[in-house]
Amino acid sequence: MNPVLIREAVVADAPALVPMCGQLGYVTTAGAVEQQIRRIQSDPEGQVLVAEVAGMPVGWIHVQIRHTLHAPPYPDVTGLVVEDQHRGQNIGAGLLARAERWAVDAGFKEIRLRSNIKRERAHHFYESLGYTMDKTSLNFRKPLTGEG
């Protein structure tokens, strides 16, 4: 088994990250991912890490400090994915551990994440790492047309 390197994402990773975004259900392009990596790199309150095996990205995690009016800021894992063929090899756990270390280094005492209700395997994975379900909620979306 090849060793896993966890490092900060770079723009050149974008084409490899696109299919993983698709595994999460998000259709995107390499150009859009490149723009997002650049934006996040320039923001000290966010980080994208990539897990690499044999020189190829096989997973990624994005953690971002979230600000709300009603609660103190907190680190939020906004996305975590490992390629299907690399799951079960502790790559996701390694990515989460690095995101948690980043949050601790930033002075936080907890980290949060959300997971789609249908991702039962992921829920068991998070629970095995000490995460507990805090609440359930529904997410709503409305396309905006710019009119009216």
Image (cartoon, rainbow, N blue to C red):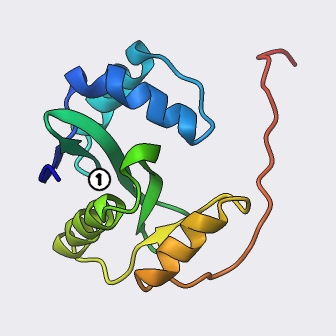
Residue 54: image quadrant is top left
The tally of labels here is 1
Q: SS class of the residue under badge 1?
A: loop
For the point 39% across and 13% down, the residue is: 31
* Residue 69 appears anywhere in the view: no
Dot 1 crowding, Cα within 10 Å, few <14, some 14–19, many 20+:
some
Residue 119: image quadrant is bottom right
Picture layout, residue 83 above or below residue 99: above
Picture layout, residue 41 above or below residue 130: above
Left or right, 130 with reference to 104: right
For the point 47% across and 60% down, the residue is: 67
For the point 51% across and 81% down, the residue is: 127
Residue 26 screen position, x and y as percent: 59, 33
Residue 71 screen position, x and y as percent: 53, 74
Residue found at the far front of this picture? 1
Q: Nearer the viewer, residue 33 or 147?
A: 33
What is the quadrant of the C terminus in the image?
top right
* Residue 120 appears anywhere in the view: yes
Label 1 amino acid?
A: Glu
Picture layout, residue 128 above or below residue 58: below
Q: Nearer the viewer, residue 128 or 78?
A: 128
For the point 41% across and 55% down, the residue is: 87
Residue 95 screen position, x and y as percent: 29, 59
Residue found at the far right of this picture? 148
Residue beneath disc 1: 45
Residue 43 screen position, x and y as percent: 26, 42
Left or right, 9 with reference to 5: right
Picture layout, residue 13 above or below residue 112: above
